[in-house]
Amino acid sequence: MDCLSPSTLSRLQRLPQHPEVVWEGDRLALNAEVLNPERPTVPLRADCFVWIDGAQQQVRGIDAVTQDQGPTAFVESLFRAMESPLSWPDEPSLPLRPGRVVVRDRELHFLLRGLLQPLDITVEYQPELPLVDQLLPGLQTLMGLADNLSDQLSDLLLEKARQVWELAPWRWLLDSHILSIEMKAFGLTSPLYVSILGGLGLEQGLLLYRSLDSLTAFRAAVSHLVLDRADLQAAFSQQDCLFLNYEPRQVTPFVRRPRLVKPLRWEDLELDFGSINPEEGMRSRLDLTELSTLYASLEGILRFMDKHSPKFEQGDFPACRSRFKIKIPDTLLPDQGMAPVIVTVKTQPVLARAFLPC
């Protein structure tokens, strides 16, 4: 990671900066283990990244990581501490950019110094971080509280995701049938481009690309690739999108599920949503604006398909456009008193023709 993408840089620059605020950041070893997805019987040792506001002596962020996760994950944790800080009822925390961050790892010092320069954040090296060292005894308790807070926010999307599953828009649309979604909210400066997965009878889900360039680059990359796992993984990690996937709880390896088998029930599914970004990698913990963006997008797609799906039943993909007023739940954006968001959903038939296989 040499520099931040324009979308990431723009998002972080919109945060208010407090030049006098200094944060300590470090990686700490936990006396804990996490599930190893490749070898479930051999658990992985867990570490965590932590960020503390020195003036307030307040924890801004804690993220559990496995020992093989390195500098990129550390940068991700800093961005989350800026945008989605831990917050407690008696000590509310607001999104902000610090004026200075202090670390005691030389590699991280050099990495952050270059990355954070466009954000006007000074990065310093110190061999001792007293606030971080004081935190360690109570860290595992705080980790549990942080996970519970994230889970409460994520749960708000479950009902909307269930409605999308029951509607099953992949019954009418292929992944090349691109929808665009525009909304003047949540810092979005360009439309989201939605690719709906599942029309070919494989995995079901939605990819919401933050730019047309990211969508076209990914499709171009995979169209020229032989099915090599490393190449596909590299192309996958370069996407810039929000995603929602529906996964069966029990999967038989290397067996594709035919289109005509009995559909899975909602209770048989695992829901997976999050963000992919070339700089930040994949993360499942979304900030409040990303959760709200995903919520409004899903609601817009539901209303759009309810209105226009008969036009797609014969395999056609005509030009369609609708505007909706969508109210964002107060739990997602508390105390902001937002008016309903105007969401415009459109088909993109020109893109659909361009993305059809030769």
Image (cartoon, rainbow, N blue to C red):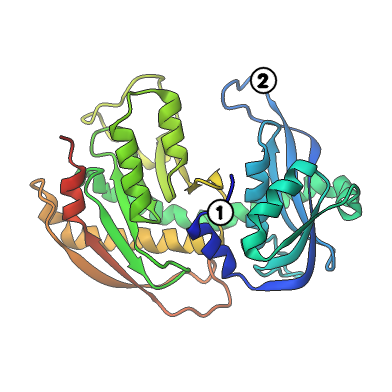
Q: Where is residue 159 in the image (x, y as percent from the top left)?
A: 42, 55
Quick one: 270 or 244, which is closer to the camera? 244
Q: Earlier in the sequence, mark 2 or mark 1?
A: 1
Give the residue at mark 2.
42
Which quadrant of the view contains residue 70? Answer: top right
Q: Where is residue 283 in the image (x, y as percent from the top left)?
A: 55, 46
Q: Which amino acid does label 1 sit on?
A: Leu
Give the residue at mark 1.
4
Of the 4 image quadrants, the one containing the N terminus is top right
Label of residue 321 in the image = none
Q: Is 27 positioned to the left or the right of 74 in the image?
A: right
Q: What kind of element bears circle 2?
A: loop
**What's the residue at 33%, 67% (across, down)?**
182
Q: Where is residue 216 in the image (x, y as percent from the top left)?
A: 31, 47
Characterize the local packing of mark 1: few (<14), some (14-19) or many (20 or more) Cα atoms within 10 angstroms.
some
**What's the residue at 92%, 53% (across, down)?**
130
Q: Is 146 positioned to the left or the right of 293 in the image?
A: right
Q: What kind of element bears circle 1?
A: loop
Q: Do the residues labelled 2 and 1 touch (CB within 8 Å)?
A: no
